[in-house]
Amino acid sequence: MKVIQLGDPILRQKAQPVAEITEELRSFIDEMFATMIEAEGVGLAAPQVGKSWRLFVLITEDNNRLVFINPQIVATSSELVAYEEGCLSIPKTYEKIMRPEKVTVQAQDEFGKKFLLEAEGLLARIIQHENDHLDGILYIDKGDADFKKKIEEQFAKRAERRELKNAQKKAKQAKIQAKIAKKEGNSLNA
């Protein structure tokens, strides 16, 4: 499972509700946790790994795994707090973002059990950040406009370089295949 980077359209789409909680979905959730941990993240939303589903996972400060299926933030505090955020889909970039200090979220866990969670501090921030992903919102949308523009331009350039490298790689592979085909053709004619 690969974390999708800024520039991929799925990160800007509103995710669809999860219709059914199945064993396959639970396996997908396990893969999400593994991907998140490998990437040294604290939260990961399904759109970040290519699925437009209303689902995110996170690990709390005391190492508890939490799964949020079809989450809804039902209340937020009026107190706003600035905290530096980053994102696995926008690696190595950080910015202070203002968010409510406390949130109440309702969701389902990986077994379909509904729950209501009141969170504050870092946990509340992670919930808000990951929930934003489900609505096509990235943390850079909530910060300084110049910072956002700079980051989007950097990632667009990276995407162009990746596409160029991929095109060069494909051309090289096609050349090799043509040489192999030519050799095979010559040996058949001999």
Image (spheres, rainbow, N blue to C red):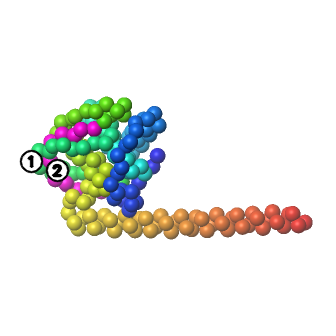
Q: Residue at x 18, y 43 (%)?
A: 74
Task: Please provide percent x and percent y for residue 78.
Answer: 9, 47
Tell me where the magenta segment starts and ends, as one range: 90-107
Q: Which mark is residue 99?
A: 2
Q: Residue at x 27, y 51 (%)?
A: 132
Which residue corresponds to the image point at 15% horizontal and 43% vertical from the top-left? 75
- Give the spatial CA distance, label 2 vs label 1: 9 Å
Quarter of the image where one finds residue 180: bottom right
In the rendered image, the vertical position of residue 119 relative to residue 89, given as above or below: above
The picture quadrant where one finds residue 184 is bottom right
Q: Which mark is residue 78?
A: 1
Is residue 40 located in the magenta-colored stretch of the structure?
A: no
Q: Which mark is residue 169?
A: none
Q: Nearer the viewer, residue 7 or 168?
A: 7
Tell me, yes or no, whether the highlighted magenta stretch contains residue 100: yes
Instruction: Locate residue 83 relative to residue 113 in the image: left or right.
Output: left
Given residues 146 and 11, the one toward you in this image is 11
Establish if 77 lies above or below 64: below
Label 2 crowding class (10 Å Cα cut-off): few <14, some 14-19, many 20+?
A: many
Label 1 is placed on what type of residue?
Answer: Ser
Question: Above or below — where is 13 with respect to 190?
Answer: above
Percent across and percent down for residue 113 are: 31, 31
Give the structural element (helix, strand or loop) at label 2.
strand
Q: Nearer the viewer, residue 29 or 15?
A: 15
Q: Position of residue 17 (x, y in %)?
A: 35, 46
**Element under disc 1:** loop
Return the disc, 2 or 1, that comes first in the chain's sequence: 1
Magenta span: chief secondary structure: strand
